[in-house]
Image (spheres, helix red, strand yellow):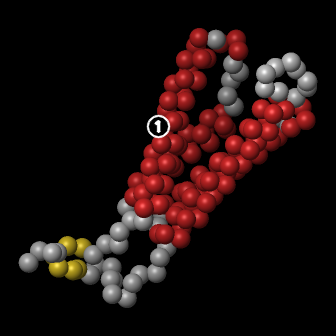
Amino acid sequence: MLLTRNRSSRPALATAICGYEVAVVLIASVGRSFDHFLRVAHPSHYHQTPLPQIVASELSVALALFSAVLLWRMRPIAAPLLAIRAGISLLGFGFILVHRPFGSAGPQPRIISPTLFLAALYAFGLGIVALNTIVAWYAYKVTARQPDSSATPGSFRQAA
């Protein structure tokens, strides 16, 4: 008779969130490589990134990786890490709002107007903040479940 630990299964949405968090890490890595290439190829067109922005970005990527692993294992600590990541995205969105005011773009003859570009940037940033907040809330709800009366931690069941 083989005994295995009784564990609750991971919901499909939690698995998708883990995939999303890993994708964030991969996209950030590719983005950093591309950013480095552009800075080397065209140094006069790019300004230095502020240190707080670099630290926030690195912290957000590290939190994404750790929270993906912890959510995969259904650990309750994943939710606070995702909430911190949502807070970092909110601060980043606030940084964009402060440093790129909506009415600051003057009229320029372009295919895409600067005003339309800023509107799209704001909408995308707000969407990322909302997505990160919803992900953190869901992770909290799914990892903070009340234990079933039939499956207490440390209980064993017979494997079929």
Which residue appears at 17% of the width and 75% of the height? 159
Q: Is residue 152 above or below residue 65?
A: below
Residue in view at x 23 percent, y 80 percent:
156
Query: Looking at this rendering, what residue extends furthest in the front direction?
Result: 111
How far across and down, in percent of the image, does residue 85 sit?
59, 52
The quadrant holding residue 112 is top right
Circle 1 Cα neighbour tier, 10 Å, few/some/many (<14 / 14–19 / ≥20): some
Asked if residue 87 shows in the view, the reply is: no
Amino acid found under the numbered disc labelled 1: Leu
Residue in view at x 48 percent, y 42 percent: 23
Towards the viewer: 142 or 16: 16
Viewport quadrant of the C terminus:
bottom left
In the image, taking residue 4 as reference, residue 115 lies left or right, namely: right
The N terminus appears in which quarter of the rendering?
bottom left
- Tell me residue 41's x, y (percent): 59, 11
Element at label 1? helix
Horizontal placement of 81 versus 157: left or right?
right
Quickly name the residue at label 1: 26
